[in-house]
Amino acid sequence: MCKCFKVSPNAFYEWKSGKSVKRVEREKILSDRIKNIWEESSYTYGGPRVWEELQKAEGKVSIARVIGKYGFRSIHKKKFKVTTDSKHAYPVSENVLNRDFTADRTAQKWVSDLTYIHTKEGWLYLTVVIDLFDRKVIGWAFSNSMTAQETVIPAWRMACYNRPIWDELIFHSDRGVQYACKAFRNLLKSTLITQSMSRKGNCWDNAVAESFFKTLKVERVYQRAYLSRNEAKMDLFQYIEGWYNTRRIHSANKQKSIWEVHGIQKLN
């Protein structure tokens, strides 16, 4: 009979004992859970992050077969374009951070950068300040221009409001004119604050901020076609506060979300 139906004896006895049915049922339950995690991440999680999330809820599970069978894959990356205007006459700070992206507490090391978002209405610029302790975006600013008054200054003020500076802080950025200009440097005049800047043409010196923008664009921007700046603002706000700063797991946090780093349980 096995030869006739071209099945192995083991598969036949598994079917006869009912084990194959149970296995199919377990696989269906597992695939549904994987699908929920995948959809919750807006289809950005691949196998490793899905596995990490399942480990927290289910314990040790094997998901390679299910992911391969149902085709759960993260969104592919696109190229990232750097926009830094470092051709200016303002002084440039030493690279104090020196690629040490670790921190023992909040408000110890912040990194910042700005990027552009395309909309049908025109360019929207986004500036962020990230705390290296937990990788949280603690300050940001949307703007229609790239002046310091509309980009880094409001982002800095939001960061200071969200995480007041109570001890020594290193603030790192690239050599862009927004960070080097007098208006912004005046805000950093404090014995507690040391300004740090990347070396010329070296994006790796600000790798955490660069990485955030890559993640933002791959997981959100490249999946949208914004009709207006306001539409982009609302969508990116939801991504930052509703996903990145809360539930998204980060490799730098040992595969924990920022909520989990601070002892906040995930809300279902």
Image: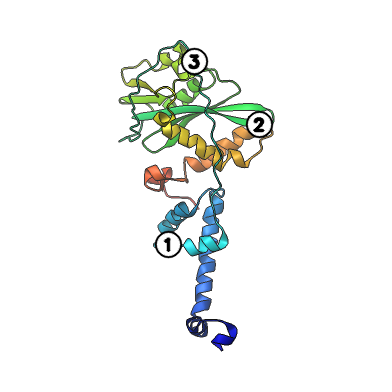
Image vertical order of residue 53 relative to residue 17, above or below: above
Cα distance, mark 1 to mark 2?
41 Å
Mark yes or no: residue 262 visible. Answer: no
Residue 91 in the image: state x and y as whole percent.
Answer: 40, 12
Cα distance, mark 3 to mark 2?
27 Å
**Amino acid type at image mark 2:** Thr
Tell me the tag on residue 119.
2
Q: Which is nearer the eye, 253 or 67?
A: 67
Residue 257 in the image: state x and y as whole percent.
Answer: 43, 45
Which residue sits at x=56%, y=36%?
237
Image vertical order of residue 267 relative to residue 123, above or below: below
Tell me the quarter of the image containing the N terminus: bottom right
Mark yes or no: residue 4 visible. Answer: yes
- Left or right: 107 with respect to 63? left
Secondary structure type for disc 1:
helix
- Left or right: 120 with respect to 98? right
Badge 3 vs badge 2, beta-carbon distance below 8 Å? no
